[in-house]
Amino acid sequence: MRRARSFPLGEAELIRRAKLYLALNQDAVTVPELISEDFEFCGPIIGPLGKAKFIEQLRGFSFRQAFPDAKNEWHDFRVDPFEANRVWFTARGSGTNTGIAPPLITEPTMKRFENPPQACSLRFNEAGEVTQYTIGYVMDRRQGNTEGVGGLLGILWAIGKPFPYPESQPYQPSWQRVLFNTAVEFLVSLQPKKS
């Protein structure tokens, strides 16, 4: 499928560029030349953010200052068979909040985050610049200690500093779903038992 969709950069080169981008631009954009002018950052809740806003937001939060021992655990880099210019990878990671990052973290909580596995991707243009970065799509909400919240929102949840809106909180079933499930269970209980 990949061969049928032509793209000037091959799999090995795209994966190399993805790893290079992550190594140089993860906690702050230190090499903005790797990002295209039409770049978009997007997560399940945050974004899309354009290049300037993305750089500004990363600059505004000192992640390494708040989590000096944080380690990123990126693995399983692969080129999408349907989008020949997109590299998918899985991200985990952990760290302890021993520093500050105002205004979000004004004093260390000394709490540790353990991220669940998250699907992330980088899309490239023909010049090899990153045009899209997606992160935070949790693959198994039962792992880690973010209770299924991905990206920075999950990290903040794990250390007890979540944003106050529902989208940054762990999933809670609605009253409609609880009512529906209760009704279904009741109707199933009325069915004759099979011998």
Image (spheres, rainbow, N blue to C red):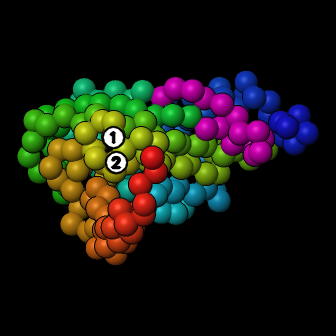
For image coordinates 88% across by 34% down, the residue present is 3
68 or 163, which lies in front? 163
Residue at far front of view: 195
In the rendered structure, find residue 65 and report the number of the disc placed on it: none
Q: How many marks?
A: 2
For image coordinates 61% across by 51% down, the residue present is 132
Q: Tell me, yes or no, if residue 17 can be seen here.
A: no
Reply above or below: 59 against 91. Answer: below
Q: Which residue is mark 2?
A: 148
SS category of the residue bearing label 1: loop
Q: Which residue is mark 1?
A: 142
In this rendering, would 19 be left or right of 81?
left
Q: Amino acid at mark 2?
A: Gly
Asked if labels 1 and 2 touch by Cβ distance under 8 angstroms, the answer is: yes
For image coordinates 25% across by 39% down, the residue present is 145
In this rendering, would 171 be left or right of 14?
left
